[in-house]
Image (cartoon, grey):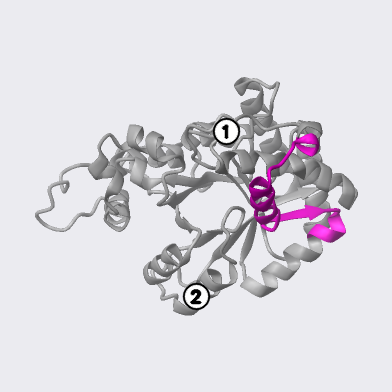
């Protein structure tokens, strides 16, 4: 048994042949299972203009999952703050906290979660697209959460309603050293996106711990997010993982579509360049039997000093996805 808490990141994969309604309801089923199995958190990502990913609006799914479960914490992994007004984020998550007190998390990211054109559609102007105002927006979000702006601030009289509940705990998310350093400086929890980052997690995770100064937290708390496909055998896991690898390759080469089946993925005629991309993506995945996956995750936890592991699993088949999380829980939580 691994003493490190285990959580779930859900991008709501949309496979070929399934409707968006089916994809969304499957995530509700998975969340109920995670609640029973002992997972710590269930987070939804924010992505846009990606046909194979249905998670565009985390706060809606957070409300549905919190209502459908009884114990597990539910949150965003994350809200991409540059896409939104801090006041609106504060209002949405204060409302969630009022409805489900003590069970909501607010994971915050600084990437657009989409391509440049969709980011422009979200932010409305090229100036807003090009400016890096994440630290300022974060400070504003925290101020709305506390209801405390500096004297003379233009938003000092603006209240994020409901104003009688706190903002849920904020976790800063990132895939490089920037968010690790900012989290450490502010004394906030930090989450590293090893599920898609080509940068090894060791540097940012350890730097966060070394540079941490007490702030929101007295002690550091680092979450390591990894992409995992677990099946009864290594061979079966590799077969299932072929779907997500091809999906990533298509996204990287502007051929976005729904999640392909393993049969389509294994028969796909990769070009030499696509094969190179596939190999780089494969290197970021943890794929195998429960014993294989447990060994790799345990080694990563030891290397990075992670306080918590968050798992993202995308498979073409819904039952295979449920089974992957069941096998993980049996290997790491029981």
Residue 316: give x, y in percent of width and height. 74, 33
Q: Which residue is mark 1?
A: 256
Magenta-drawn segment: 265-293
Asked if residue 35 can be seen in this view, the reply is no
Q: Magenta-highlighted stretch: main secondary structure?
A: helix
- How far is mark 2 from mark 1, CA to CA? 35 Å
Residue 333: give x, y in percent of width and height. 77, 57
For the point 55% across and 75% down, the residue is 206
Picture quarter containing residue 248? top right
For the point 44% across and 44% down, the residue is 79
Q: Is residue 94 above or below residue 40?
A: above
Decide which of 15, 84 is in the foreground and name it: 15
Asked if residue 11 can be seen in this view, the reply is yes
Look at the numbered discs 2 and 1 and tell me whether their residues touch, using CB distance below 8 Å: no
For the point 86% across and 53% down, the residue is 289
Q: Earlier in the sequence, mark 2 or mark 1?
A: 2
Query: Is residue 60 rendered to the left or right of residue 25?
Result: left
Residue 70: give x, y in percent of width and height. 64, 39
Q: Which residue is mark 2?
A: 207
Q: List the single residue furthest toward the bottom.
A: 210
Q: Quadrant where the C terminus lies? A: bottom right
Number of the front mark, 2 or 1 = 1
Specify whether residue 175 is painted magenta: no
Picture quarter containing residue 266? top right
Label 2 Cα neighbours within 10 Å, binned few <14 / some 14-19 / many ≥20 = some
């Amino acid at each position: 048994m691994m003493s490190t808490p285990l959580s779930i990141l859900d991008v709501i994969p949309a496979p070929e042949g399934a409707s968006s309604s089916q994809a969304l309801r499957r995530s509700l089923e998975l969340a109920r299972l995670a609640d029973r199995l002992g997972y710590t958190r269930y987070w939804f990502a924010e992505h846009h203009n990606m046909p194979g990913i249905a998670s565009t609006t985390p706060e809606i799914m957070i409300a549905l999952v919190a209502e459908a479960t009884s114990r597990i914490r539910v949150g965003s992994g994350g809200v991409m703050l540059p896409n939104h007004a801090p006041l609106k984020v504060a209002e949405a998550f204060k409302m969630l906290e009022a409805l489900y007190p003590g069970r909501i998390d607010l994971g915050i990211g600084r990437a657009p979660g989409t391509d440049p054109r969709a980011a422009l559609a979200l932010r409305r102007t090229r100036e807003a697209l090009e400016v890096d105002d994440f630290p300022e927006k974060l400070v504003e979000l925290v101020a709305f959460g506390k209801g405390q702006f500096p004297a003379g601030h233009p938003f000092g009289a603006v209240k994020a309603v409901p104003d009688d509940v706190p903002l849920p705990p904020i976790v800063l998310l990132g895939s490089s050293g920037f968010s690790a350093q900012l989290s450490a400086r502010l004394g906030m929890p930090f989450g590293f996106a090893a599920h898609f980052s080509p940068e090894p997690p060791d540097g940012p995770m350890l730097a966060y711990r070394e540079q941490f100064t007490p702030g929101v937290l007295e002690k550091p708390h680092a979450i390591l997010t990894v992409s995992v496909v677990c099946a009864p055998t290594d061979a079966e896991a590799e077969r299932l993982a072929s779907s997500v690898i091809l999906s990533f390759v298509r996204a990287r080469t502007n051929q976005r579509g729904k999640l392909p089946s393993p049969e389509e993925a294994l028969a796909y005629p990769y070009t030499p360049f696509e094969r190179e991309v596939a190999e780089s993506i494969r290197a970021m995945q943890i794929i195998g039997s429960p014993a294989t996956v447990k060994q790799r995750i345990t080694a990563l936890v030891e290397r990075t000093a992670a306080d918590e592991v968050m798992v993202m699993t995308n498979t073409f088949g819904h039952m295979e996805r449920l089974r992957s999380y069941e096998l993980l829980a049996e290997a790491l939580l029981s």
